[in-house]
Image (cartoon, rainbow, N blue to C red):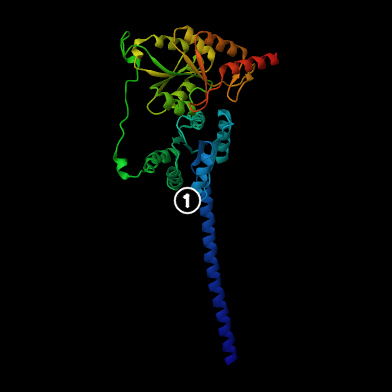
Amino acid sequence: MIGIVTKKLLLLSLISNKVILFKKATAILSKCIIFILLSNRMEEIDMVGIILASHGEFAEGILQSGSMIFGEQEKVQAITLMPSEGPEDLKAKIETAIVALDEEEILFLIDLWGGTPFNQANSLFEEHKDHWAIVSGLNLPMLIEAYASRFSMTTSHEIASHLVTIAKEGIRVRPESLESQETSKVSGNQGHGGSLPEGTVVGDGKIKIVLTRVDSRLLHGQVATAWTKSVLPNRIIVVSDAVAKDDLRKKLIEQAAPPGVKANVIPVQKMIEIAKDPRFGNTKAMLLFENPQDVLRAVEGGVEIKDLNIGSMAHSVGKVVVSKVLSMGTDDVETFETLKSKGLTFDVRKVPNDSKDNMDEILKKAKHELANVK
């Protein structure tokens, strides 16, 4: 009798244990199902994609720094403009990164306003402005905050608006007393003649041309930063018939102007008129031309240009490469020689810190290379 009772007790105990194990297994299974469902839901939720873009390897470096502090992140691409690459190379990289992100909402964090990374991102921006945002001045506090913001913010516009404040707060100084010293902005007369009656004489009535540059890229990072800081213009004037007719290019150039400097795009004839207009007497102008032919037209029209900086001239059919940044055709060589005969001197430099190249040697090489092509 005792043996039968013992067996029943053992059987009941075994059944009870199995029930408990079953309940535990069911609970674990339920949690797994919930986790899987939540994971799938998270995959369905769109995340704001981030593209970091910079001159040199800065974008890749700050991506690594951000990962060290905040962990590895999804939907982030780093784009670099290397010394051997041009704007179109960078644009292709950006387009590839956009495809890789596969997100409608994209936030661009750029190193420098008006530089090539900014300009190329900005050239694609207009068609996507409802879902894209561009923020310049990339720093580590900005990047970390962008990562954190993606948990609670679902649009690039929300994050960009938030980052403007956070990025500024990340700039601190010691001694702390320096932080309370506000620097006043210089808001001098920009020399905008259009708001003054015709015939009004401002200053000495003569526009001050602080730099005249031939650069097929026109307004980009080297111009917006290095040259602007070197010659201190209060207005950048892009002189080009073609660009003056292109509303998109005009808008992009105006947006690329550095802080405190206004940018305008005008045709050559308008530049000739402005050079004779006394209302622009307080204007310190940097003139940017795409080619030497437009410079010659301006000079022949009465624009007083004494020194011509040669920055870059893009290669095209019929031209030969004469340096890393200069390509010339027969018409270019003849135009430069005509300008020289009119008393202009040449300053062949990409940026102010570069040493000057010998223009006579460059023209000699161009003639030789063109003769060989024929």
Whether residue 69 is situated above or below residue 60 in the rendered picture? below
Residue 90 in the image: state x and y as whole percent. Answer: 56, 32
- In the image, 178: left or right of 160? left
Residue at (60% x, 15% y) in the render: 363
Kind of element beneath mark 1:
helix
Residue at (48% x, 24% y) in the render: 219
Task: Pick the quarter of the image with the N terminus.
Answer: bottom right
Whether residue 164 is situated above or below residue 305 in the rendered picture? below
Within 10 Å of the Cα at label 1, are there few (<14), some (14-19), or many (20+) other Cα atoms?
Answer: few
Residue 237 in the image: state x and y as whole percent. Answer: 43, 18
Q: Nearer the viewer, residue 41 or 345?
A: 345
Q: Nearer the viewer, residue 259 or 325?
A: 325
Whether residue 36 is situated above or below residue 160 in the rendered picture? below
Outermost bottom residue? 1
Location of mark 1 (residue): 69
Residue at (29% x, 43% y) in the render: 177
Residue at (57% x, 28% y) in the render: 88
Q: Quadrant of residue 319?
A: top right
Q: Nearer the viewer, residue 30 or 161?
A: 161
Q: What amino acid does circle 1 point to?
A: Ile
Q: Quadrant of residue 201?
A: top left
Residue 7 shows in this picture: yes
- In the image, 317: left or right of 303? right
